[in-house]
Structure formats: C-alpha cells, structure tokens
C-alpha cells in the first residue's frame, strides 16, 4: 500500500489558518480548484482551523461531484429533452438517472459540511448567534461555487 505524504504544515488546533493550506494530493483537479476558492473564503471569514480540513476535503469533493453531475445532466438534456433526469431501461422501466442521484447526494453532503462551519442559515439559528456575516458568507461561497460550474 502506498503511503500518502502529508502536505499540510501543522499548526495549533485552535489556531486559524492565515494562508490557504495545500490541497491533498488525492483530490481531483476540479476539487483542488474548489479547495483554493472555499479555503480562501473561510480564511477571510476567520473560521478555517486544522480541525476543519477533513470537512473541507469532503465539501470540495462533493462540489466536484455535483459539478460533474450537473454537466452530465445538461449534456443528456441537449441530446433529448428530459433524458438527463430519467433513465429508461430496455424493459421499458424508468428510474431517476444516476447523475440525478449523484447530484442529490452531493448537495446533501455539501450542506452537511457547510453546517460544520456554521455557514448555513439553520445551523446559525441553532447556534443562537446574533445576526452576523455568516449568511453573507454562505451566499458568498455558493456564488463562488456556482461561478465555476
């Protein structure tokens, strides 16, 4: 089994990152692009800590999967309207497409990861925080991620 080299320089657990840490080598090129964008947003908001790196990995990988699924659905729909949403088998049976399932699961994963950072409206409310820039930060992340899709 091949060992994966740790490219992240250690810092104290409660200390926040000031610079974007290197993305893990096993992430896809798309996920690495999202890593840089999202990490920068989280650093600017002063919420990225070493304990969040695993959540960030999952978030950017889910975003890459979401992006792939959306592109595949659009490609199928260009060939035949609606074909990206429904999969039809030779028996005549129909089911939701694999890409739709991938997209749904990626959205669910992204929302769970954003909750870890307190960046979705529901977790902000659960934390009983005063109105802050967290909602604006959530909107900012979603806008940045949409730009790259």
Image (cartoon, rainbow, N blue to C red):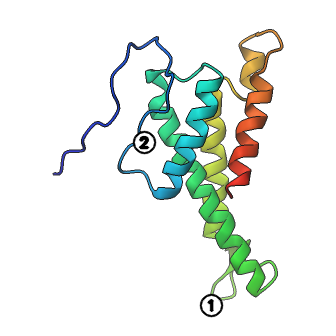
Inter-mark Cα distance, 1 to 2: 43 Å
Left of 54 or right of it: where is 91? Answer: right
Q: Residue at x 71, y 45 (%)?
A: 144
Q: Position of residue 31 (x, y in %)?
A: 51, 51
Q: Position of residue 11 (x, y in %)?
A: 37, 17
- Residue lying furthest front: 19
Left of 60 or right of it: where is 94? Answer: right
Residue 23 shows which numbered tag? 2
Q: Quadrant of the C terminus?
A: bottom right
Q: Position of residue 121 (x, y in %)?
A: 78, 27
Left of 49 or right of it: where is 46? Answer: right
- Residue lying furthest left: 1
Residue 10 versus residue 83 in the image, above or below: above
Secondary element at image label 2: loop
Q: Position of residue 73 (x, y in %)?
A: 70, 71
Left of 16 or right of it: where is 2? Answer: left
Judging by the rendered image, the residue that carries numbered circle 1 is 90
Q: Nearer the viewer, mark 1 or mark 2?
A: 2
Which mark sits nearer the N-terminus, 1 or 2? 2
Please identify the quarter of the rendering in which residue 72 is found.
bottom right
Q: Residue at x 69, y 78 (%)?
A: 75
């Amino acid at each position: 089994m091949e060992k994966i080299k740790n490219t992240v320089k250690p810092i104290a657990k409660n200390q926040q990152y000031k610079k974007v840490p290197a993305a893990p080598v096993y992430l896809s090129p798309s996920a690495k692009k999202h890593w840089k964008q999202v990490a920068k947003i989280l650093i600017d908001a002063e919420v990225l800590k070493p304990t969040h790196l695993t959540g960030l990995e999952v978030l950017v990988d889910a975003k890459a999967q979401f992006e792939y699924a959306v592109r595949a659905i659009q490609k199928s729909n260009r060939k035949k309207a609606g074909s990206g949403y429904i999969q039809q088998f030779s028996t005549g049976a129909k089911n939701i497409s694999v890409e739709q399932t991938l997209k749904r699961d990626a959205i669910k994963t992204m929302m769970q990861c954003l909750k870890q950072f307190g960046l979705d409206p529901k977790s902000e409310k659960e934390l009983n925080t005063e109105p802050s820039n967290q909602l604006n930060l959530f909107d900012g992340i979603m806008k940045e991620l949409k730009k790259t899709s």
